[in-house]
Image (cartoon, rainbow, N blue to C red):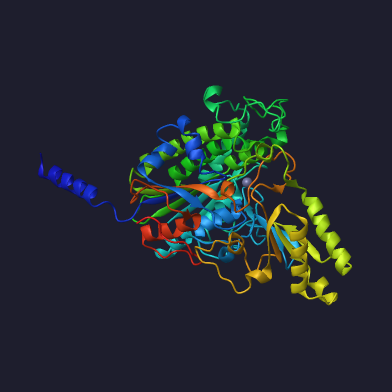
Amino acid sequence: MSIARIILLIIVSIGYIFPQQIPKLVVGIVVDQMRFDYLYRFNNNYSENGFKRLMKDGTNFTYAHLNYVPAYTAPGHSAIYTGTTPFFHGIIGNDWFNKESGKHIYCTDDERFKGLGGNDRMSPLNLMSTTITDQLKLSNNGNSKVIAVSIKDRGAILPGGRLANAAYWYNSLNGNFVSSTYYMNDLPAWVKEFNNKKLPEKYSEMEWSLSKPLKNYRLSLPDETKIEPDLFKEGRTYFPHSLKNIKEEDKLEYLKSTPFGNQLLNDFVSAVLDNENLGQNSVTDFLAISYSSTDYIGHRYGPNSVEIQDTYIKLDLQISELLQMLDAKIGKGNYLLFLTADHGVAEIPDLINTKIKQVISHNKFVESIKGFLLANYGTDKILSDYSNEQIFLNYSVISEKKLDIVDVRNKLAQYIRDNFNSILIVFTRDDFNGKIPSRNDPNSLLNGFNSTRSGDIFIEFNSLSSFELNGMDKSTHGTPYSYDTHVPLLFFGWGIPKQEINEPVFTIDIAPTLAILLKITEPSGSIGKPIIK
Ligand SMILES: [Zn+2]
């Protein structure tokens, strides 16, 4: 053996004994609407190299929860990446009633910027906290590269924070991955090249058939059932599904409600890794990925459907494919990965409440509030808006009528308590006055309250009741209850021990944990705590 070879061997051995001081890449994976139990309920049908690899070789937190309402996509992604709740990060819904303009605003809409590849004028500027991705950039004068990708705009933009090099998402009007002038002046050539391949058009011609024989899906409801919608206009609800009967102009939108949406994102991630040189120099880069098709399919078919089970069997293979790409491009042990969800989902109401339907009409609820206001104050214009389970009152009407705002809030809150026995909790803004939540605050309504943006009265149904659903949706999420808040939390790769931890933790702990592992400052609004020692 030559001396050079011996020296090389020594260097390689030192590398094993003293692993790299920082990971080359952090990979954040959010699976939209993934419940914790899916890791176990579908386990028999998973491969060895997807979810099971993360569970076996990483740290598996079996009792991770959201600690705020509403359990929606935008607050969910914000909480994960800012380490805090809507009280501090300000994203109180996917959209919300804007008190100044009197109109609803979407969480990432921003007219100051233009769409690239589509007409999506967007930015992350409604976030009231930095993100862990921002902190990584701030730690080294912007040398880290941060790229965030998703099918949903908000699934990419919020994780990327203010300082991302790029956020890319899917535009179903033209099938492109698009971005905004907030990040850059023009899409990179490789993104245009990717879009020119027209993969969504190709996928929309393909059939969604089961990955396993039907008998493997016996923990789900029957494939043909009356409580499922005929989403794809096939005159049946059983497999296989296809977009054959969907109008040509709607196909790229419907594609999101099939597992091909997740595959398309994997294809895009592969192009990111091929073209952006992530993890190839002396600083840590960050790739934030959010799989969205799980949420679209979950809303339509619910958590007990063959459709959702098959979506996860396929996602397991897509995660396995992603890990293979990362092993090849970044190297085993050189990347730090976490996987979690922005929220879970409720069982289909018809399945739980088989004898009595505990479903309330949204319109009747609003009409009833208006009736109370009219009878007691002579006008229903006192109600400005009801959204995200919050009532917004019209302050100028209240002052014109010379009414006391606190009194109006209290009387309306009491009316709701007295008249809707499916509603368990009613708080007014005054109940939260002067309160500042900490990590352990058990009041998920206070944690979800933002003094600037939130409304006047906050309601929560009991854990078995909900508003009735409209259209094709058969289930939804948003509550502080276990089905919506218990999510998977797996850490894997660089610096992560093999272990299972059953202690309660929160999704707001993810960002401070990454901060400590990377030895950087946690996000500005963070109230979580590091959970990996
Ligand atoms: Zn959803």
**Residue occupying the point 30% across, 56% down:** 21
- Quarter of the figure with residue 138: bottom left
- Location of the C terminus by quadrant is bottom left
Taking the image as drawn, is residue 259 in sight? no
Relative to residue 195, is residue 233 drawn left or right? right
> Image check: 435 left or right of 467?
left
User: Going 71% across and 36% down the picture, which residue do you hit?
Assistant: 249
Q: Is residue 429 above or below residue 52?
A: below
Camera-side residue of 334 and 465: 465
Which residue appears farthest toward the bottom when viewing the image?
A: 402
Task: Give the total number of marks visible in the rendering.
Answer: 0
- Find residue 479 and report its horizontal and vertical position in percent: 62, 52
- Image vertical order of residue 166 relative to residue 454, above or below: above
Q: Is residue 31 visible?
A: yes
Provide residue 315's location: percent of width, then percent of height: 51, 36
- Residue at point 10% right, 39% down? 1
86 or 183: which is nearer to us?
86
Q: Position of residue 248 (x, y in %)?
A: 71, 32
- Vertical relation: 43 (above or below) 509: above
Q: Where residue 455 sits: x, y (%)?
A: 70, 65
